[in-house]
Image (cartoon, rainbow, N blue to C red):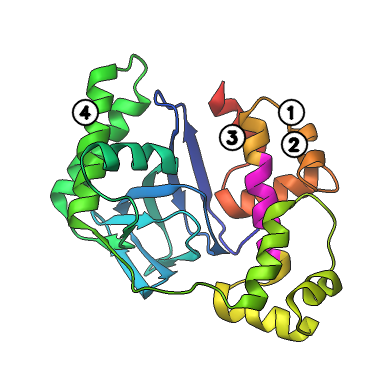
Amino acid sequence: MGTGRVHQMTQHRSALQGVEARTLVSDRVFPRHSHDQYGIGVMLSGAHRSWSTIGQVEAQAGDTIMVNPGEMHDGMPVGNGMRAWRMLYFDPAVVARIATGEGQSATEVMRPAAHDPILAARFAQLFSRVTMTSPDPIGIEEGLMVLVMHVLRRHAFRPPSSNGPSPPIKKALARLHADPAAPVTLRELSELAGVSRFQLIRGFNRELGVTPHAYLLQRRVLLARALMTGGQSIVEAAMNAGFADQSHLTRAFFRQFGVTPKRYVAALA
């Protein structure tokens, strides 16, 4: 589950649909993974280093950290090994709705780290409003729009045009995306891709930063989370997402999100 000896993660109840709020205090090293949401957060103390699509970046206390849907990244402490940060995760539809409504484009990607005191203050304000016991709807809506538009105008850019993964990797990804819960073998994926099993593993590592098995586990975790959000029990979600049992889901879920499925579901109540 990682090398960290201290890991405290609070999944806050969010007053806004499509937005999740977390507070983390950890010296844990997070392996390379991705989310299906936009993430915006602020470092509270310590320092954090992560791999991103533009290379290694570091964030100090007060800096904003950001991640895009599907973007592979990892995370590790810098210095004395302890850091604390808060995060808000936004469903892509939430960001797209605000962007298109304001004549902006949601196709740009957010930079992984920025030193922007105004952005940090706007984040803190929205985080407080989203997690308060008696939320103020108009205040939340206003804070959400101000934060998202600030990021899109100041800290987003259109990446260089790219054809994405190579054709063999695209074929394998299509299979994993179509039915992540279904059993699959390296032989099946390599035959679909038209390459050897070794070439498939090497291609995944080179182009995505993870192995086919690690990528599949991440897709299953995302599926399980969606099923639990939709009302399925943890046991049902584990079975329907392709995990052998609840314990396998719990380990993979914690590895990716830093929280157990039980605590995640409790925050949804």
Around disc 1, counting alpha carbons within 10 Å, would you say few (fewer than 14), some (14 to 19), or many (20 or more)? some
Question: Is 254 situated left or right of 18 in this image?
Answer: right
Q: Quadrant of the N terminus?
A: bottom right
Q: Residue at x 65, y 74 (%)?
A: 169
Residue 54, image x, y percentages: 36, 74
Q: Residue at x 41, y 48 (%)?
A: 38
Between the residue at mark 3 and the residue at mark 2, the CA separation in whole angstroms equals 13 Å
Between the residue at mark 1 and the residue at mark 2, the CA separation in whole angstroms equals 6 Å
Q: Sequence-wise, which precedes: disc 3 or disc 4?
A: 4
Are circles 3 and 1 on residues that touch, CB within 8 Å?
no
Are circles 3 and 2 on residues that touch, CB within 8 Å?
no
Are circles 1 and 2 on residues that touch, CB within 8 Å?
yes
Frontmost of labels 3 and 2 is: 2
Residue 237: mark:
2
Between the residue at mark 1 and the residue at mark 4, the CA separation in whole angstroms equals 34 Å
Q: Sequence-wise, which precedes: disc 3 or disc 2?
A: 2
Residue 83, image x, y percentages: 39, 56
Q: Which residues are magenta?
A: 214-224
Read off the residue under disc 4.
142
Element under disc 3: helix
Residue at the extreme top of the image, as rendered:
134
Give above or below for 212 relative to 8: below
Look at the image and tell me whether residue 250 can be seen. yes
